[in-house]
C-alpha cells in the first residue's frame, strides 16, 4: 500500500532509507537481543503540505512506556533554557488573573516546575509513567496520558479552559497531530495560544543533521508546515522564534485566526524557507547524498583510529545516536563503549548495534584517546566540562555539520 501523508493524505514516496532501525531509546540487555524490534526508517517529504515525516513508525506504546529512558533533567543548559521559556510564556501569554497552563509531554516536570514554584495553575500531560512520577516528586501536577481531544475534554471538565498549551520537543513525536489540534481547540480559551518548539527542518538540512530522524520524531517541522497543519483547524502562526537548542530549533506560536497580531518574523521565516528550497523535492535528494557522504567519512575516520590502536568511546547515548550507529553500522568493534549520565541506560546495550553503555564515572578508570560526540547539540556544555581531557591532547570526533576531528 502506498503510504500517505499524515496531514493531508497525499500519496508519498520516501526520498531515502536509513535501513532497519531499532527503537531509538530501546536500550536493552543481552537476553532481549534475539527479540529486538526493528522497522524501516524512511523519511518522505509531502510536496502538498510541506511536511517532512517518517513513513513507518512503531506503535507509540513501544516507545513511550513505564521504562522510557529520556529524562529532561540531564543537561544543565536545558534547565536554564526551560526556565527562560517558562518566563517568556508567563510574561507574554499568562497575563489574565489566575491563568492556567498545560504542557504536552511534560516529561520529568523540568519546565512545569517553573510555573508550579510561582503557584501558577498548571498541569503536565505525560504518557510515560516513570517520568510522570518523577515530575510529581518535584511538585508538578501531572496527568499520565497522551494528549488528544479526549484528554482535553477531561481537563476542561475538571479544571476549566487553558490560557496556554505549551510543548517542547514533543509535537514532532505525535503522529496524530489532528487529535492534538482538536484537543487544543477544545482546551484553549478564545484568546488562548498553542506554543511549541521543536528541532527545525532548516537547520537539519543545513547541517546534514540526519540523526534528528528517528522513530520518535515522526515529523521535522518548518514554519510553512506548521502553518499548513494548523490552518485546517482555524489556527494561524502568529510568531516564530529560532532557538539554539537541540542543534537548531524553532519556537512556534499559534492562535485562533484574527485573535493575535501576526509578527513580521513569520513572513521573514517563510521567505527564508522558500529561498532555501525547503518546499522542493530536490532539496531532500541532495540531503540524502550528503547523508551517504557523511556515513562514508565517519566510518573511515573510526576505522583509521582503530587501525592505529586508538581507543574511541561514545559520548552520550542519545536517541539520535541510534540512527547514526545503525545507519553507519558502527558497533563495539569501533566504539568501545558509550558513556552516559542517565542511570536507566547504564549497564545496558545500545539499540541495534549493542555497544555497552557505561556510567560517566567509568571514565575515571581511564579516559580514551578520543570521544565520538553523539550529543553534538550540547557541544558547548560538554567541551566546557571536558576541557582538561581536550587540553591533555584528547580528541573529539564530530559529524555535524560535517565529519571532523576536533583538537585543542
Ligand atoms: P540529548 O541530545 O538531549 O538526547 P536525545 O538525542 O535523546 O534527544 O542528550 C541526552 C542524553 O545525553 C542523555 O542520555 C544524557 C546524555 N548526556 C551525557 O551523558 N552527558 C552530558 O554531558 C550531556 C549534556 C548529556
Image (cartoon, rainbow, N blue to C red):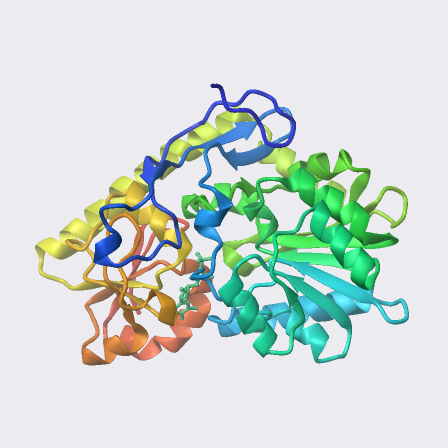
- Give above or below for 22 relative to 396: above
- Residue 394 found in image quarter: bottom left
Residue visible at 68% across and 38% down in the picture: 178
Is 350 on the left-hand or right-hand side of 138? left
- Give above or below for 100 relative to 16: below
- Residue 234 found in image quarter: top right
* Residue 102 at least partly seen: yes
- Give above or below for 74 relative to 12: below
Residue 301, percent from left and from top: 21, 50
Residue 17, percent from left and from top: 37, 32
Is 186 on the left-hand or right-hand side of 12? right
Q: Quadrant of ligand 1?
A: bottom left
Task: For the C terminus, give its image quadrant.
Answer: bottom left
Q: Nearer the viewer, residue 170 or 262?
A: 170
Residue sticking out furthest to the left:
308
Is 124 on the left-hand or right-hand side of 394? right
Residue visible at 63% across and 24% down in the picture: 48
Amino acid at each position: 500500500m502506498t503510504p500517505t501523508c499524515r496531514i493531508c493524505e497525499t500519496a508519498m514516496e520516501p526520498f531515502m532509507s536509513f535501513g532497519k532501525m531499532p527503537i531509538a531509546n530501546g536500550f536493552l540487555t543481552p537476553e532481549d537481543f534475539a527479540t529486538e524490534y526493528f522497522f524501516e526508517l524512511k523519511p518522505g517529504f509531502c510536496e502538498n503540505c510541506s511536511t517532512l515525516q517518517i513513513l513507518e513508525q512503531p506503535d507509540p506504546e513501544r516507545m513511550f512506556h513505564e521504562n522510557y529512558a529520556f529524562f529532561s533533567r540531564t543537561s544543565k543548559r536545558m534547565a536554564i533554557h526551560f526556565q527562560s521559556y517558562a518566563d517568556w510564556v508567563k510574561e507574554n501569554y499568562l497575563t489574565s488573573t489566575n491563568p492556567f497552563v498545560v504542557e504536552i509531554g511534560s516529561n520529568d516536570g523540568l519546565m512545569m516546575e517553573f510555573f508550579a514554584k510561582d503557584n501558577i495553575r498548571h498541569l503536565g500531560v505525560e504518557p510515560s509513567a516513570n517520568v510522570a512520577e518523577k515530575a510529581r516528586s518535584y511538585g508538578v501536577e501531572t496527568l499520565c496520558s497522551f494528549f488528544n481531544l479526549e484528554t482535553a475534554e477531561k481537563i476542561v471538565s475538571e479544571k476549566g479552559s487553558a490560557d496556554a498549551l505549551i510543548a517542547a520537543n514533543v509535537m514532532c513525536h505525535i503522529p496524530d497531530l489532528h487529535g492534538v489540534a482538536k484537543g487544543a481547540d477544545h482546551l484553549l480559551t478564545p484568546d488562548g495560544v498553542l506554543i511549541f518548539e521543536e528541532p527545525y527542518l532548516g537547520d537539519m538540512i543545513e547541517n546534514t543533521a540526519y540523526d534528528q530522524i528517528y522513530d520518535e520524531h515522526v515529523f521535522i517541522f518548518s514554519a510553512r508546515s506548521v502553518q499548513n497543519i494548523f490552518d485546517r483547524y482555524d489556527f494561524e502562526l502568529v510568531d516564530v522564534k529560532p532557538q539554539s537548542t537541540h542543534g537548531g530549533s524553532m519556537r512556534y506560536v499559534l492562535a485562533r485566526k484574527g485573535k493575535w497580531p501576526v509578527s513580521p518574523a513569520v513572513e521573514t521565516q517563510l521567505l527564508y524557507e522558500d529561498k532555501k528550497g525547503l518546499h522542493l523535492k530536490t532539496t531532500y535528494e541532495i540531503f540524502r547524498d550528503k547523508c551517504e557522504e557523511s556515513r562514508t567519512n565517519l566510518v573511515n575516520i573510526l576505522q583509521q583510529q582503530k587501525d592505529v590502536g586508538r581507543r574511541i568511546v561514545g559520548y552520550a547515548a542519545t536517541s539520535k545516536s541510534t540512527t547514526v550507529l545503525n545507519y553507519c553500522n558502527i558497533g563495539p568493534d569501533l566504539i568501545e563503549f558509550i558513556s552516559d549520565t542517565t542511570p536507566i541506560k547504564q549497564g545496558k546495550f545500545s539499540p541495534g548495534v549493542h555497544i555497552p553503555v557505561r556510567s560517566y564515572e567509568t571514565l575515571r578508570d581511564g579516559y580514551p584517546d578520543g570521544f565520538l560526540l553523539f550529543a553534538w547539540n550540547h557541544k558547548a556544555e560538554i567541551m566546557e566540562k571536558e576541557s582538561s581531557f581536550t587540553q591533555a591532547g584528547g580528541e573529539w570526533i564530530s559529524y555535524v555539520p560535517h565529519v571532523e576531528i576536533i583538537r585543542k
